[in-house]
Amino acid sequence: KALEPVGAAALIQTVRGAGYRCAPPA
């Protein structure tokens, strides 16, 4: 999954933005 930093970044942004309260930024 190191070849898809964009997808990872987008997923992290989503977790940090919307699911931050329900899911910790791991």
Image (cartoon, grey):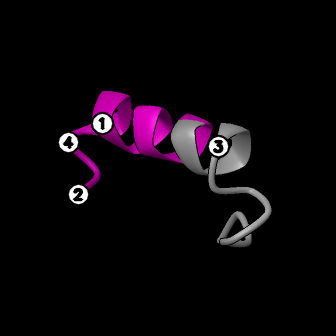
- The alpha-carbon separation of the residues under discs 3 and 2 comes to 22 Å
Earlier sequence position, callout 3 versus callout 4:
4
Q: Is residue 3 above or below residue 2?
A: above
Spatial CA distance of label 3 from label 4 is: 25 Å
Q: Closer to the N terminus: mark 1 or mark 2? A: 2
Q: Classify mark 3: residues with Cα within 10 Å, few (<14), some (14-19) or many (20+).
A: few
The amino acid beneath tag 4 is Leu
Say left or right for 15 vs 25: left
Residues at marks 4 and 2 touching, judged by CB atoms closer than 8 Å = yes
Identify the magenta region. 1-13
| Residue found 59% across the figure and 51% down from its top | 15
Q: Secondary structure at mark 1?
A: helix
Q: Nearer the viewer, residue 2 or 23?
A: 23
Which residue corresponds to mark 3?
18
Left or right relative to 2: residue 19: right
Does residue 15 appear to the left or right of 4 in the view shown? right
Name the residue carrying label 4: 3
Label 1: which residue?
A: 7
